[in-house]
Image (cartoon, rainbow, N blue to C red):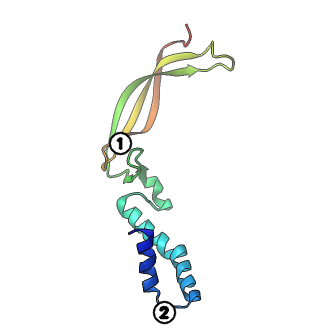
Amino acid sequence: MNKKEFTAYVEKELEGLTDEQKIAIFRKMEGNWIPSLLKKYQKKLGYYVEPKKKDEYILCGECKKYYSKKKVKSEYVNETRTETTYTDAGYGDDDMIGDVRYFVEYKTCPRCGHRQEIGKLYMETKNERRARG
């Protein structure tokens, strides 16, 4: 349905009402009916979660839909990442990099299969060296 078809449909449904009555109905639609219908269908598809319950859900970074933390099992992995361990306040000539080991928690989105990092716990840093040789 496009704008022209929608306008014709609404005009037909509101036929016989005064302009004031039409405005009152449009205000109800704008302020209450449309937002509640929109939330209903967004919630059904996973695009919306009530603000009170957001802590129980994870937003997938790929498909932008919510999924329950409880319904998806976590996967825990030991990972080593090369990253900056120290940054000086000057030109960067004293910056340090190292191999940092983390215990990382991942969850996989049940809708699109995207694997998402939920949290990580620092374990240790090894092989720390100057960033510029």
Query: Residue drawn 49% across and 17% down?
Result: 98
Residue 115 placement (x, y as % from top left): 35, 39
Mark 1 Cα-neighbour bin, 10 Å: few <14, some 14–19, many ≥20: many
For the view shown, which residue lies furthest in the top direction? 133
Question: Gap between marks 1 and 2, in whole Å?
Answer: 56 Å
Mark 2 Cα-neighbour bin, 10 Å: few <14, some 14–19, many ≥20: few
The mark found on residue 16 in the picture is 2
In the rendered structure, the answer to whether residue 82 lies left or right of residue 115 reads right
Precedes in sequence: disc 1 or disc 2: 2
Query: Residue drawn 63% across and 16% down?
Result: 92
In the rendered structure, the answer to whether residue 4 lies left or right of residue 94 reads left
Label 1 amino acid? Lys
The quadrant holding residue 88 is top right
Front residue of this view, candidates 116 and 76: 116
Query: Residue drawn 57% across and 87% down?
Result: 19
Front residue of this view, candidates 116 and 45: 45
At mark 1, the secondary structure is strand
Residue 11 placement (x, y as % from top left): 46, 82
For the view shown, which residue lies furthest in the bottom direction? 16
Label 2 amino acid? Gly
Residue tagged 1: 107
Q: Is residue 56 above or below residue 73?
A: below
At mark 2, the secondary structure is loop
